[in-house]
Amino acid sequence: MTHSASRHRYDVLDGLRGIAALLVMVYHFTLFGQWPLFPNGNICVDLFFILSGFVIFHSYGEKLASGSMSLTRYLAKRLIRLYPMLVISSLIGIPTLVFINSLGLANFTRPSLISAAASNVLMIPYLGDRAINNMGIRGHADPTSASIGSIFPINDPAWSLFFEIVASGLFLLFLRASEKKLLVIAAWGAITTLIIALLVEVNSGRLALQFGLGWATSNFLGGFSRVVYGFATGILIYRLRARDSQPGALGPLRKWIPSETALYGLFAAICAFPYLARGIYPFFIIFTIAPILVWRGAELDVLSTRSSHLTRLLGRLSYPIYLLHFPIGRFVFAMSWSGQQVHAILISIIATLIVSYIVERFIDRPFRQFLEQSLVRQSAPASQADVRTKCSTQLD
């Protein structure tokens, strides 16, 4: 990896991550309505895992391999990136869960509420079997609208955050793996995920593949293999690109996806496909199409300054949107006496976008910058600390 490569910014991938977060938001808000949009929105989570493997290797791979960054500092930086927003979202998610529970839209006891909240704030899965009406839709009789045994009941999408932390630790094992070993690891993750997906459905009396493993106690173990596949694939893509090796399918894809707009539109269309085909369709996309889309996104450059600003904004807002939309939407829908209506969806979307921007701009980013600066000061060599002390003494 060259120095210039390590400094390259992948604006198109930032935008892709932001588009995926928006699709997840709309997917959750419309899933149980009359016209569900992006019914294959779960694909976005696996795209996040692949992007994380790619971006983390880009950001930390060379530093860790050369020893210029310690393992402790790497893990601290990952926690600083991920944990503050979880706490912020919990400040909305916990009172919202208590509120919908008081309305009879969840079946938590007081001890189970305390246990779930404490576990989730500490980024620990809650391995219970309580049921929650996903979006707090009053009078919604459809039992499929309930999350049963969600491991992050205060904020359902945060389940993937737990596996992001797991993958951040596994990254240290993947770092020095050869490309052949990474391919074997990714294949193991894919095959294991398929086996678990089949067994979970067979256990329920259905012959299908359950896509969306990891979010509940009933499919919790599948989340490990799912994230292993995504992270290993993302790292492998980065490594192969670094030595100019590319898949054959990428040739014609360059003509079909000439710009970031085409890339985003194609991914949205993939998520909007109205059928799961017994789980075969989403797995096919994740194991074949998604890695190629990430590869193509890494190739593309944003040509205009306006587009660059937009893709970077989408990238910055992707994480807040992903973690804040569910508790915000749950509260809005629970407050809507008319059930799931267009106005509740629109209010939830607008509120999520506004709150996400405010939180990212004025709370999360400044707080993370403060923590990063504190980390730098703590990890500075003693000699530098002595110099600063002497300078401070002279100035005084």
Image (cartoon, rainbow, N blue to C red):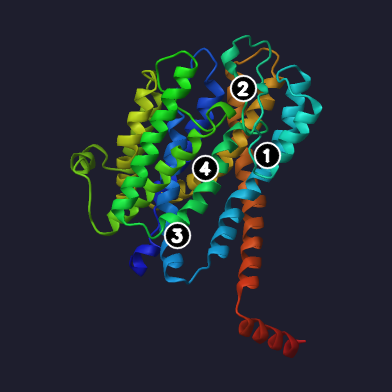
Q: What residue type is labelled 1?
A: Asn
Q: Is mark 2 on a helix, strand or loop?
A: strand
Q: What element carries label 4?
A: helix
Q: Is mark 1 on a helix, strand or loop?
A: helix
- Whether label 2 touches label 1, CB < 8 Å: no
* Vertical arrangement, residue 383 with respect to residue 80, above or below: below
Q: Which amino acid does label 4 sit on?
A: Ser
Q: Which amino acid does label 3 sit on?
A: Ser
- Residues under labels 2 and 1: Cα distance? 16 Å
Q: Is mark 3 on a helix, strand or loop?
A: helix
Earlier-in-chain disc, 3 versus 1: 3
Q: In which quarter of the image is the N terminus?
A: bottom left
In this picture, residue 38 sits left or right of residue 297: right
Residue depth check, mark 1 versus mark 4: number of the one nearer the observer: 1
- Whether label 3 touches label 2, CB < 8 Å: no
Residue placed under numbered mark 4 in the picture: 318
Residue placed under numbered mark 3 in the picture: 59
* Vertical arrangement, residue 143 with respect to residue 89, above or below: above
Residue depth check, mark 3 versus mark 4: number of the one nearer the observer: 3
Earlier-in-chain disc, 1 versus 4: 1
Residue placed under numbered mark 1 in the picture: 120
The front one of 328 and 209 is: 209
- Residues under labels 3 and 1: Cα distance? 28 Å
Residue placed under numbered mark 2 in the picture: 148
Earlier-in-chain disc, 2 versus 1: 1
